[in-house]
Amino acid sequence: MAGHFSQTIILGNVGKDPEIRTTQGGQKVASFTVATSETWKDKQSGETREKAEWHRVVCWNEGLTSVIERFVRKGSKVQVVGQNQTRKWTDQSGQDRYTTEVVIQKFGGNLVLCGERGGDGNSPPQQSQPRQQSSQQRSGGWDAPSGDNLDDEIPF
């Protein structure tokens, strides 16, 4: 049987400024959330409805991580191409936990900046000091969830 292929493409707005971490081996990794939404017209009421979905994104591509660190901020519109991956870890109480992320690998993934929120796409991004945190500083290490509340304010 031939090999299999999995690709996930999302287009949405970044939920908050990305977190840039450095592994013990010195590799930078970016993590952030992207909100996507779908709208439809309710058949009974005729009202327009909207549902938002939050996606965790992790970038292991060092070149793209540098772009994310410099230019991606809360509200940035991005297109992410990666693979869905589910991780398992054990929390502090001994319970198995799972999370699914869109992972941008070193090869085969991509990130496209689609313009600033509310802008024309030609304005330069606002520069702010990126936040970095080593894997040792992060409670629970790489296997623990970020603890982010995915029900934050929708950035669009």
Image (cartoon, rainbow, N blue to C red):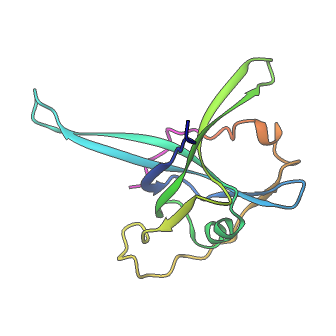
Could you say which quadrant of the image residue 48 lies in?
Answer: top left
Residue 69, horizontal then vertical, whole percent: 66, 68
The image quadrant where one finds the N terminus is top right
**123 and 84: which is toward the camera:** 84
Drawn side of residue 7 relative to residue 63, left or right: left
Could you say which quadrant of the image residue 141 lies in?
Answer: top right
Question: In percent of the image, x 42 and y 55: which residue is there?
Answer: 12
How many marks the image carries: the answer is 0
Residue 47, horizontal then vertical, whole percent: 14, 37
**29 and 51: which is toward the camera:** 29
Drawn side of residue 5 relative to residue 146, left or right: left
Could you say which quadrant of the image residue 123 lies in?
Answer: bottom left
The image quadrant where one finds the C terminus is bottom left
Q: For the stretch drawn in magenta, what is the main secondary structure?
A: loop
Question: In percent of the image, x 70 and y 37: which residue is there?
Answer: 145
**In the current view of this chain or complex, which residue is farthest to the front?**
1
**127 and 35: which is toward the camera:** 35
Question: In percent of the image, x 48 and y 42: which residue is there?
Answer: 54
Question: In percent of the image, x 68 and y 62: which residue is there?
Answer: 61
Drawn side of residue 28 relative to residue 45, left or right: right
Residue 86, horizontal then vertical, whole percent: 63, 34
**78 and 15: which is toward the camera:** 78
User: Is residue 15 shown above or below 122?
Assistant: above
Queried whether the magenta region covers residue 133, the answer comes back as no
Q: Which residues are magenta?
A: 149-156
Residue 3, horizontal then vertical, whole percent: 57, 42
User: Is residue 141 shown above or below 99?
Assistant: below
